[in-house]
């Protein structure tokens, strides 16, 4: 409730289209309502104008997916056949995906260390990515043989081919993969980048700034950072929590911090970050996603957390914003709540649906 609502000049939304009509008879009220827009703008619900774009995109995706379901296997003359196209796609994927990691070498270079949990995090990440790589290499190899008629085209291989032809992540890969909503080409490109990041870590050591998007299991990395701090200062692990600091763009990230970790690779939906004001501000028109600054994940104890005006921003791995609880008790999608500096109340950004995304 707003006290100002009693003022005749009070407007319910920034556009000024919605306000209480002047006192009059029944007909005057009917005429007033007839002047209202037929399609309500997002501002009526406290949303940003960009919410219309998101709604339209979701409706378009649903329509395109429905059309794909009706697509037949017949091909018209003049172009490449489906089999030729799939053979090219499979060859490109097989060429771009590197072989599995050498776990024996990684465990030798980065043995289990009580004071350096990142060694265990790296080796566990390699195991998870190797499972995915093994499935990709095996399925692509079998699919190429099936296209040549050298082995039987099973139902799984046929589903693999259909997904590749439609530009989607095959179901057999998704079972062993990290969550992703990307089309196949973007998925492969990001996977290669993740693998290159891990290979660089093996060759050159832990980086001074971590690309948080690149982890298969992000919670393991966050737990490792907390463990390092707890063991360094001999604190109970269940009393250690994260504090967050948004770093200026001109900060020197070539050296890792004494405690915690610099993390990059996060995006924000529903708002944007202002480097000048160092706070959250409204999104630009027609811009749905923007990069977040590098954040310093600083381990501390609950009683020493910094207190400042902020928005408790949930971080998700994908824009789907929902997941399932794993046996470890962690969500398959939700990562952590990030305290982002803000000069507006929490409710403002909650209505905007503001959230951070890793992919």
Image (spheres, rainbow, N blue to C red):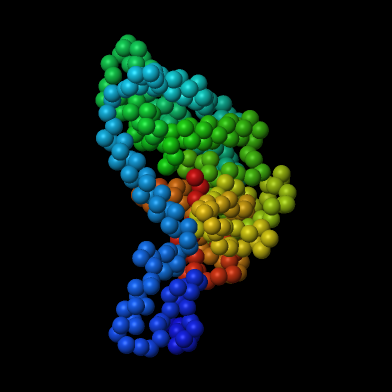
With 76 as the anchor, is 16 left or right in this view? right
Residue 335, visible in the rendered structure = no
Query: In the rendered image, which quarter contains the N terminus?
Result: bottom left
Q: Position of residue 144 (x, y in %)?
A: 38, 17
Q: Quadrant of residue 115?
A: top right
- Work out whether residue 67 or residue 162 is closer to the camera in this orientation and state it: 67
Q: Residue at x 58, y 35 (%)?
A: 197
Residue 317, visible in the rendered structure = yes
Q: Residue at x 58, y 53 (%)?
A: 292
Q: Residue at x 45, y 76 (%)?
A: 12
Q: Position of residue 167 (x, y in %)?
A: 40, 32
Image mark count: 0
With 238 as the anchor, is 164 left or right in this view? left
In the image, residue 258 sits, relative to residue 171, either above or below, namely below
Q: Residue at x 28, y 36 (%)?
A: 69
Q: Position of residue 210 (x, y in %)?
A: 60, 44
- Work out whether residue 343 or residue 245 is closer to the camera in this orientation and state it: 343
Q: Position of residue 156 (x, y in %)?
A: 29, 26
């Amino acid at each position: 409730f707003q006290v100002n609502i009693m003022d005749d000049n009070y407007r319910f939304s920034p556009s000024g289209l919605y306000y209480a009509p002047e006192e009059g008879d029944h007909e005057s009220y009917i005429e007033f309502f007839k002047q209202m827009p037929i399609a309500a703008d997002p501002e009526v619900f406290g949303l940003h104008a960009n919410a219309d774009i998101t709604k339209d995109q979701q409706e378009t995706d649903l329509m395109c997916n429905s059309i794909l379901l009706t697509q037949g296997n017949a091909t018209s003359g003049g172009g490449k056949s489906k089999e030729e196209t799939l053979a090219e796609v499979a060859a490109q994927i097989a060429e771009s995906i590197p072989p599995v990691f050498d776990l024996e070498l990684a465990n030798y270079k980065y043995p289990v260390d009580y004071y350096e949990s990142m060694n265990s995090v790296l080796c566990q990440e390699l195991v998870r990515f190797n499972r995915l790589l093994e499935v990709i290499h095996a399925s692509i190899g079998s699919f190429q043989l099936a296209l040549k008629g050298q082995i039987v085209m099973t139902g799984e291989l046929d589903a693999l081919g259909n997904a590749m032809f439609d530009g989607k992540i095959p179901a057999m890969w998704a079972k062993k993969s990290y969550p992703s909503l990307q089309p196949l080409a973007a998925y492969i490109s990001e996977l290669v980048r993740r693998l290159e990041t891990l290979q660089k870590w093996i060759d050159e050591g832990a980086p001074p700034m971590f690309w948080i998007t690149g982890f298969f299991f992000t919670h393991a990395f966050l737990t490792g950072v907390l463990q390092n701090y707890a063991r360094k200062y001999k604190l109970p692990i269940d009393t250690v929590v994260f504090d967050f600091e948004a770093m200026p763009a001109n900060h020197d990230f070539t050296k890792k911090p004494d405690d915690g970790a610099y993390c990059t690779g996060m995006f924000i939906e529903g708002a944007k970050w202002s480097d000048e004001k160092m706070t959250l501000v409204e999104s630009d028109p027609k811009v749905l996603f923007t990069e977040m600054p590098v954040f310093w994940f600083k381990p501390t104890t609950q009683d020493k957390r910094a207190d400042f005006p902020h928005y408790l921003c949930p971080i998700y791995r994908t824009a789907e914003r929902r997941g399932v609880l794993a046996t470890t008790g962690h969500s398959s999608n939700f990562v952590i709540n990030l305290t982002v500096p803000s000069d507006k109340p929490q409710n403002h950004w909650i209505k905007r649906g503001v959230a951070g995304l890793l992919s």
